[in-house]
Image (spheres, rainbow, N blue to C red):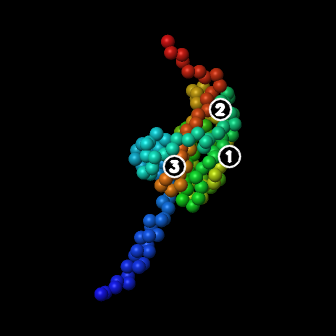
Amino acid sequence: MIINMNRGPVVGIMIMMLFAKATAFPSKVGCGLIGDSGKNVMTRTTVMGATPIDVSNLISFSSNTYSSGGQQITVTISNLETGSSSGALIHSDKGSLSKPSSFDDKGCSGTNTLYHKQNGVSTSYTLTLTVPSDISNVNSITISVITAAGYGAIDRQAKSLTKSGVTSPTPA
């Protein structure tokens, strides 16, 4: 009987790979929240092979409305997935959103702002949203957040602020 002593390291490496945690890749998302698939990550039924959970505890505002251009609203981002393989992205469709510490700026043009961080995300961040100076055509501002712990446990939320005094048309 011949025993192959070279299989031990190979088997060990394979076992380590099974237990290795996959890393989230928030940098793959574009300025319009479009991922590698060409679809919006806030509306997709799967993201990175997992089913995202739509939650309501990631975003809170100091005020849910704004009434003037240049107004500043505190945006608190909470309950993010943390750890070495965690990732998060924070997006604003209008206005100027302050950048969370150690996040990367996607460098979006126009009214979009997108920040992302891969690995070592903190549980929460406090940011400042500055409403655009001209709000005549800005009836709402939406902040979107996605947080993931590797290729699983993906939570997401989109929450909007509205301009004071804006009402929906009443159906006839």
- Label 2 Cα crowd, 10 Å radius (few <14 / some 14-19 / many 20+): some
Quadrant of the drawing holding the N terminus: bottom left
Residue placed most toward the observer, 83 or 1: 1
Using residue 17 as the reference point, say whether residue 68 is left or right of it. Answer: right
Front residue of this view, candidates 143 and 14: 14
Question: Which mark lies nearer to you, 2 or 3?
Answer: 3
Per the rendering, the mark at residue 154 is 3
Q: Residue at x 65, y 30 (%)?
A: 65
Left or right placement of residue 83 versus residue 67 in this view: left
Mark sitting earlier along the chain (2/3): 2
What amino acid does circle 1 point to? Thr
Mark pair 1, 2: CA separation: 16 Å
Across and down, in percent, residue 104 comes to 57, 53
Left or right of 21: which side holds 129?
Answer: right
- The amino acid pointed to by label 2 is Asn
- Report the residue marked by disc 2: 64
Chain-order first, disc 1 or disc 3 = 1
The answer to whether residue 125 is above or below residue 64 is below
